[in-house]
Amino acid sequence: MDTRTRSVEQIVPSTPGQLTVYACGPTVYRYAHVGNLRTFLLTDLIRRTAELLGLQVRLVQNITDVGHLQDDTAVDADGEDKLLAQARAENKDPFAVARFYEEAFHRDLALLGVHPADAYPRASECIDLMVALIVTLIDKGKAYVGDDGTVYFSAESFEGYGAISGNKLSELRAGHGATGESTATGKRFHADWALWKLASESREMTWPSPWGHGFPGWHIECSAMSLELLGSVIDVHTGGIDLRFPHHEDERAQSDSAAGHEVVRHWVHGEHLLFEGRKMAKSTGNVVLVADVVERGFDPLALRLAFLSSRYRQQANLSWDAIAAAQKTLDRWRASVAAWAEEPSKPMCAEVQAGVLEAFCDDLDTPRALQVLRTCEKSSMPDGCKFEIFAWADRLLGLDLARDVGRAPAALPEGAASLLSERATARGGKDFAASDRLRDALAALGVAVKDTPAGQEWTLS
Ligand code: AMP
Ligand code: ZN
């Protein structure tokens, strides 16, 4: 679902065969909670689906270790940086705190079966890029130095402001609204936001700049890092729903103003996760970590399966009961896959495979994909066939289903799964010319297809 166009769009990579993805990463001042992880999983599902379709994916996820203030709407230099506050609370060096939680983040992702990104740029190591981008924005008349020495982005200079969130500038009242703030500043317009803030010498995590010693705003980090590492056209940009505004709205204004065109082709946002019906917040003591899940004796991949049971764009209500139920399914599937693997390998049923793949391609309809697999599990299909299907589907699911199996499943060559899926559609529509053409294309990849009353079957030739 493309948040900006508010419709499900087909993703056509700007460079054929390659997909570029930017994911807003964690602010490393605390452990990621399971809500954060649900959002990080969204990016992993996009990546796995694209790779299964034969695309080469380049994924960049930033590490925010500076500039994310406690109150995102505040732009004053006295604003409390989340990381500095935590460092004070732990009586540690802020960089030590940042590296500690960054490592914990990587460990959590690994436990959850999330494939690592190709780059994890740290905001604190990209200050030069941010300064250069701010200089460009000033040169283009999009940013200015306010009376208070802060560099602001001029919201009114960007015509399309509000397209992602629907928050039009004319409707954002001064002193209110998410970018407006009540304190007097050197801004010329209430919805302008800070790109660079001046700081006293005593503040930690500050850098020199053409405008004086200070630190960057949070939004400019993502523009600078994404433009540098992925270029000025980015196929997909992900994040949690709360980042729609102001973070992504402001990032879009900055990036597009610098590039002179629409930089991000598709904005995809994951809805929030509730736990036992309540928002996850430190203040209410309702925060669940992967460590808590492990402590209760669950496999972290049961958490992953529980996430897959709801679609990313729906708010999900996770509970201990739901994780326990997912653990049961996970145990059963692993045992079944191991048992099925004992039977002679049989060609995979391409219809079931197409059902799973189509569900993933249909805006990551993971509940439907799981339903297709449950139906297959209960069907009278030969065990050797079920084994191949579940082992293949696990490339999308990431549940380590073949963990207890000694042999490797037959792996389809890259791009073959989507050809099989297309062929199933062609056959369904009685388009036999296309079906024959796709059979030849599959044969060229080394996949022999046979049509049976139950649908297509394939083997590696
Ligand atoms: P943060 O570390 O606070 O910058 O957040 C990291 C990511 O988690 C962002 O993409 C947020 O939008 C997302 N996020 C925060 N809270 C939740 C939640 N309860 N459910 C899902 N995603 C969340
Ligand atoms: Zn971001």
Image: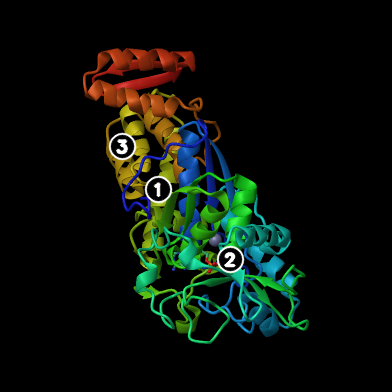
Quarter of the render that holds ligand 2: bottom right
Three-letter amino acid code at disc 3?
Cys
Secondary structure found at label 2: strand
Visible residue check, residue 263: yes
Tell me if 195 is positioned left or right of 320 in this view: right
In terms of image quadrants, where is residue 278? bottom left
What label does residue 143 carry, if any? 2
Q: Earlier in the sequence, mark 2 or mark 3?
A: 2
Secondary structure found at label 3: helix
Look at the numbered disc 3 and say if its residue's Cβ is closer than 8 Å to ligand 1.
no
Above or below: residue 71 compared with residue 166: below
Disc 2 from disc 3: Cα separation: 58 Å
Q: Earlier in the sequence, mark 3 or mark 1?
A: 1
Q: Nearer the viewer, residue 50 or 378?
A: 50
Foreground: disc 2 or disc 3: 2
What label does residue 361 carry, if any? none
Foreground: disc 1 or disc 2: 2
Q: Position of residue 216 (x, y in %)?
A: 65, 69
Q: Are marks 1 and 2 in contact (CB under 8 Å)?
A: no
Residue ID at (49%, 52%) = 237
Tell me if 84 is positioned left or right of 187 in this view: right
Above or below: residue 260 compared with residue 411: below
Q: Mark 3 = which residue? A: 376
Q: Mark 1 = which residue? A: 332
Q: Position of residue 364 (x, y in %)?
A: 37, 46
